[in-house]
Image: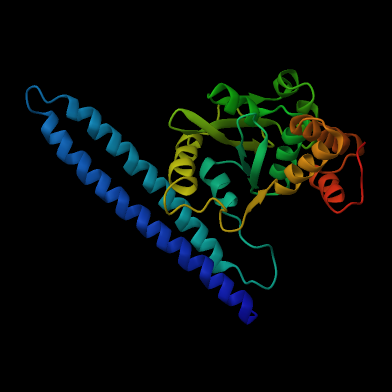
Amino acid sequence: MDPQGRRENLGLTAVARQRAALARERADRADAVAERHELLAARPGQEFHAQIAKTHRRTAECHRASARLQDDFAARAAAWSGERGTRPRFMTVVAEACGTPSAAIALLDAERNQLAVAASDRLARTAQDLEFVLGEGPGQDAAAGHRPVHLSGPRIEARWPWCGPSLLSLGIASVAAVPLRAQNSCIGALTVFDTRPMDTGPVHLAEVAEALTHIVLLDPDADPDLYGGTDMRATVHQAAGMVSARTGCSVSDALALIKARAFTEEVSSETVAGEIVHGDRKLI
């Protein structure tokens, strides 16, 4: 292993282990608080403490789910040579925790445009790019409806006439998505993909999504970059702003134009946006 790769490897492992330890400590504290309230709830007239205890038990479960993800990532980072093979991705352990081969997170704005995306592999990233360009798909529906989505086989194409056929052509036979809820809002969606048809959605999908939202992404000690695995759509939104300024159209219309050009030319929206930003392309 080269010295630089070894340092990077040790750094990833140490940080993940520290975050796992911190999550377990917080889980233990939440459980202790829950236990006190459960004892108080047993007293006459103090039943409201049961709800408080339930909230703290849920918080403890969330921290423990986060700790498991961090531990699994630490193990992958420790095994990475740094010389060959791809750098370990946090989303890979997310996919494994959900019991699926592929998973992706998309963070969305108020108009459900992707601000950032993190994927476990090429399949998940391609599927997210399709949602971004075509404006429909499982993650979009989960975020818009604030509810889980699960479809298999021909129902995928029936539900999403633009995106569905492309998902099936990738070999995807089943999709499931859950919203990433933050208080009364939704910041995005966690979507998993499987090449096998599945009658029910992954058992642990909602639990993993809650841990990702409240601990990994929004906690004061959070890492929204997911150990360098998150790709920001900054170039696309910068290009949309440039097109808007040049043509006088709205930013949303400029963004739609970039997506349409990417779809027509069968390239990524980042490719079109990069050419606009560097002055190599004019859309109008």
Q: Position of residue 171 (x, y in %)?
A: 76, 36
Is residue 249 in sight in this rendering?
yes
Residue 88 sits above or below residue 196 on the image: below
Q: Position of residue 130 (x, y in %)?
A: 76, 35
Residue 281 relative to residue 56: left or right: right
Name the residue nearer the viewer: 80 or 160.
Answer: 160
Residue 180 relative to residue 65: left or right: right
Name the residue nearer the viewer: 84 or 146.
Answer: 146
Q: Which residue sits furthest bottom?
A: 3
Residue 25 relative to residue 118: left or right: left
Is residue 199 in sight in this rendering?
no
Give the residue at x 76% y 41%: 241
Give the residue at x 56% y 76%: 7
Q: Position of residue 183 (x, y in %)?
A: 43, 31
* Total labels drawn: 0
Residue 9 sits above or below residue 102 on the image: below
State the quadrant of the C terminus: top right
State the quadrant of the N terminus: bottom right
Image quarter of residue 228: bottom right
Image color mode? rainbow
Give the residue at x 81% y 30%: 249
Q: Position of residue 18 (x, y in %)?
A: 41, 63
Give the residue at x 46% y 68%: 14
Q: Which residue sits furthest left?
A: 44
